[in-house]
Image (cartoon, grey):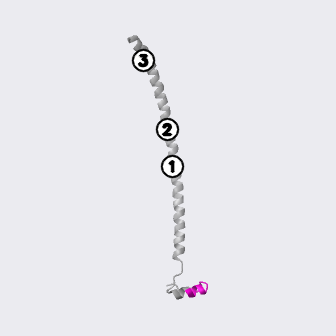
Amino acid sequence: MLADMKSHIPSTLQSDLIALSVIRLLIDELLLQVDAQATLIGEMENLLNMEKTLVAEKEERVTRSLLELPVWGSPRDLVAALANGGDDDNSD
């Protein structure tokens, strides 16, 4: 029985070493995937920041154009301005 255990130990040790090698390879592969994903996330974050900047600039232009619209003191002034093609701007 002791002889059987001695002959079994080296094969168990060999199996354990193979398993450890496989585990190390898997860990290395997972670390490479994590690095690639981190890079991709960083690139996506940059793209989203650029898009956010573009949206903010467009929103600013639209807001500015709305604020620059003429304001009339009364509905009659508005009707008169529309009748004149918008030349009569009575801004207050």
Q: Is residue 90 above or below residue 63?
A: below
| Lateral position of residue 29 relative to residue 5, left or right | right
- For disc 1, the neighbor class at 10 Å (few under 14, some 14 to 19, many from 20) is few
Magenta part of the chain: 79-88
Q: Are marks 3 and 2 in contact (CB under 8 Å)?
A: no
Q: CA distance from mark 3 to mark 1?
A: 47 Å
The kind of residue tagged 3 is Ile
Left or right position of 82 against 19: right
Chain-order first, disc 3 or disc 1: 3
The front one of 75 and 59 is 75
Q: Was residue 84 drawn as part of the magenta stretch in this picture?
A: yes
**What is the crowding at mark 3: few (fewer than 14 residues within 10 Å), some, or many (at least 20)?**
few
Numbered label attached to residue 56: none
Q: Estimate how packed mark 2 is, as few (under 14), some (14 to 19) or many (20 or more) residues with alpha carbons within 10 Å.
A: few
CA–CA distance in space, label 1 to label 2: 16 Å
Residue 15 spot, x, y in % from top left: 46, 23
At 52% from the left and 54% from the top, the residue drawn is 46
Q: Residue at left 40%, top 11%?
A: 3
Answer left or right for 61 relative to 3: right
Mark seen at residue 30: 2
Q: At label 1, which amino acid type do we have?
A: Ile
Q: Secondary structure at mark 2?
A: helix
Q: Amino acid at mark 2?
A: Leu
- Secondary structure under tag 1 reads helix
Task: Measure how far apart labels 3 and 2 are at the Cα level.
Answer: 31 Å
Residue at image point 51% right, 41% down: 33
Residue 12 in percent (x, y) is at: 44, 20
First-in-chain label (3 vs 2): 3
Counting from the top left corner in percent of width and height, residue 87 is at 60, 85
The mark found on residue 9 in the picture is 3
Tag 3's secondary structure?
helix
The residue at which mark 1 appears reads as: 41
